[in-house]
Amino acid sequence: AIVRKVKKVVDMRLDAPELAVALKELSEFYGPNTLENRRNLRSSIERRGVEVSKRLVSTFGDVMKKLDMVEGHVAVLAECSTRMQQRIQAAHATTSQVVKVTEQLQRKETAAEEHKALVSEFLVRFRLRPREMHALLHEPISDEFMDVLARVGKIQVEVRQLLRVHHKTALMDIVDESSTLQEKGFDRLYKWLQTMLGSMDGDSSEVPPLVRRGIRALRSRAALYKECLADLAAGRRQVLLKKFMVALTRGGPGGMPKPIEIHAHDPMRYVGDMLAWVHQSIASERELLSALLAAARDEPASGTGEPVADEGAKGTTPAEVKAEEDAVLAAVLDAVGSTVQARLEAVLKAQHGSVMVFKLGNLLLFYLHTIGGLLARDAKLTAALQGLHKLAGRLFMESITQTAQRLYKQPPAVPAGLGPHTDIANVLQELAEVMSSFDGSLIPARLREGYFKPVLDESIEPLIAGASLSANAIAAGGGGGYPPHS
């Protein structure tokens, strides 16, 4: 053991820092290097260690107290943290449902906003705005009214297309609402057109564009459209009859042209002036009707579009528009036609000469072809002219028949110079005038022969028969005359 200690001492490094520190510390409490001090070195070191430990314990006592306080605080904090954690867990368990509900509500809100946007767009497209509603139901008829009415028709068309694939109550409600608004709009339009057409007393240049547009829009309502055309015909019929009576009795402005009846003593002039006035009026009325119905000829009845009310439902062919014009024109001329017929019948029946009757019939035939080409076949004026022409032909043929019967019953005596009797000469003169009148007729040449052949048949045969009877009377009396040559 001693050897080990000696060896340990020998191996110890004297320059080690730990040794220097230990020796320095030992010099502070180790006294003189005596035997007693050397013997008590261990106890001295231990006492020194105990003192140092006591000082350390005394020094760290306050620290320990503070650490104990900190530990207490930490324990309290730990307890509070535990309670907070428990609360948080409880709150999380509670709020997780709230969060889930909130998320669901947010999704529903987003969907509701999208649905609201779609509904708003749907209503903007398929319902009228308050301004449009007021324009349709309360404001005077204008282009804005026509635009709104056309939009209502477009809404109906689009909603009906949607109903083919979606049977929704909202769509049915919109159809009902738009139908009601459309009917009210068309009623207002019809009444307005009644007023406008009833007060129209001008030519085609005075037709307002809005009236033309209204007529085109009303075409989609067949019943109202027919009533509108009937009202138009009635109004124009009264206007035209009034103008005709003014032309008969007072003439034009300032007396020019002169009244037609001032020439009543001249049947040809009188009848010609009346029929010429009617022919000119037909052209004016046709132009007016063409201007009123021109839009229907160029665009579909709806509708629509330009936007037309219920426009675009179906197109209108030029033939259909022409038929409508013919029907209205025929109705417009009814009153004038009746007046003309009565006056011309009186003129024809008042004539005693067959030549004048024939000339009047020839004139009627010309206007029958001229005016008849402008009217429908079933027009009353055309039928009236046909009846008047037949009356003239009947009166002319009756006159020829009376002459023939007179020649048959009382054959004229042959003059001493063996020339034609005055009666036969007069008949020949009338026939020559008839032929001259017919040659100067404006009737197409292809139609003349068919009309004139019966006249020749009824005129020549009585002359030949009368001359033959007169010649037979001469032969029976023993005269030396010669039979007449045909």
Image (spheres, rainbow, N blue to C red):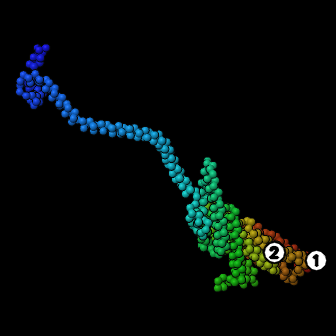
Residue 284 at least partly seen = no
Amino acid type at circle 1 is Ala
Q: Quadrant of the C terminus?
A: bottom right
Location of residue 368 in the rendering, given as x and y in whole percent from the top left corner = 73, 70
User: Any mark on residue 396, and which?
Assistant: 2
Q: Relative to 137, say whether 28 is above or below.
A: above
From the viewer's side, name the closer residue of 92 and 455: 92
From the viewer's side, name the closer residue of 119 and 341: 119
Residue 319 falls in image quadrant? bottom right
Residue 477 at least partly seen = yes
Q: Are marks 2 and 1 in contact (CB under 8 Å)?
A: no
From the viewer's side, name the closer residue of 149 and 166: 166
Q: Relative to 118, say whether 442 is above or below.
A: below
Q: Which residue is mark 1?
A: 476
Asked which secondary structure carries label 2, the reply is helix
Circle 2 packing at 10 Å, graded few (<14), some (14-19), many (20+), is many
Residue 124 falls in image quadrant? bottom right
Q: Quadrant of the N terminus?
A: top left
Give the residue at the far front of this rendering: 36
From the viewer's side, name the closer residue of 311 and 370: 311
Location of residue 469 in the rendering, given as x and y in whole percent from the top left corner = 90, 75
Amino acid type at circle 2 is Phe
Q: Is residue 59 left or right of residue 140?
A: left
